[in-house]
Image (spheres, helix red, strand yellow):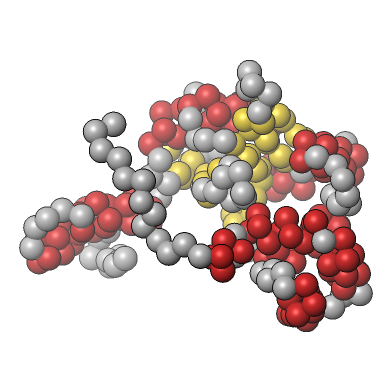
Amino acid sequence: MKNKNLTHNHPLDEKIYKNYSFVRNKKLEENNEAYDLCKTLIAAKTSTYNNRKLISDKFDINLTRKDINNFKQKLKFNLVGDKSDPELLKTWINQILNDNSENSVQIKINDNGVLECLYIQTSQMKTWFKKYSNIVHIDSTFKVNIENYQLYICLVQNANLKGVPVAYCLMVSGIKENLEFFYSSFKKLNDLSETQVVMIDKDLTNAGILQDYFDKARTLLCVFHVLKYLHVQVHAIEIPSTNRMNIMKNIRKLLYDNYQMSVI
């Protein structure tokens, strides 16, 4: 490290601090009266808006719509009380497995006892994949919760051409070892022999690993993600804007014919 800057590049005040999700939720959990009121309002099917307003007016806890919806999900799966996060996760996993014997959960824990990967596939997901396994889309979403886990999703298109999920995998990071865990779990639980195409985003780490598991499939990069990535990279080059536009124009010509021209 050659340089360091310990100065904050954003405003600092109490209002900003209070708006962090972990602060909001901690205040709710530590205030028994507010916690019980929020729980009662959800049970009574009060609107999210009125729930938030009552909690804010009475206890000065400014919950967001997402906070309320997350709390509803915890109530739905009985994930409330004094249990630790690992205990709550174990309760949720056990419920998934008990709901249907065909549901599958695979777990990878590292040497420090930290959950590295969590693979989930329900019986319905297995049915969807069995019916529509010829083309698989793999996508990733970053920082889906406060622990910043990455969510990888396998999708297929059903008969109505709508994408349906056929497997989920939460992982600490998309390193090779975690991706191999994801794909090996998927292969162990499903027949991949009918899959002809696997569509991925710009993450080329995926491309080098997929062939070991989808050995009969052709791997393709998603055009949308590729163009979006190239758009950012090209516009970061310090050249005249007309040159950047011409570069992107020629890139699109490589990808589309005259009847399929598209812009970002």
Residue drawn at x 87%, y 61% is: 32
Location of residue 211 in the rendering, given as x and y in whole percent from the top left corner = 46, 28
Residue 78: give x, y in percent of width and height.
Answer: 89, 51
Quadrant in the picture for the N terminus: top left
Q: List the single residue furthest toward the top.
A: 111
Task: Work out whether 233 lies above or below 219.
Answer: below
Tell me where residue 202 appears, x and y as whole percent.
38, 45
Which of the 4 quarters of the picture holds residue 126?
A: top right
Q: Nearer the viewer, residue 55 or 156?
A: 55
Please report the residue visible at 65 percent of the width from the left and 54 percent of the height from the top: 22
Left or right of 154 on screen, residue 83: right
Side of 218 relative to 148 (left or right) = left
Near-viewer residue (257 or 180): 180
Residue at 56%, 65% (x, y): give it. 14
**On the rendered structure, is 149 left or right of 243?**
right
Quarter location, residue 65? bottom right
Comparing 199 with 49, the one in front is 49
Residue 182 at least partly seen: yes
Quadrant holding the C terminus: bottom left
Q: Tell me which residue sits at (77%, 48%) in the image.
A: 124
Q: Nearer the viewer, residue 177 or 34?
A: 34
Q: With respect to residue 192, does 227 lie above or below?
A: below
Q: Quadrant of residue 102 in the image?
A: top right
Residue 109, compared with residue 199, is above or below; it is above
Q: Position of residue 125 (x, y in %)?
A: 72, 46
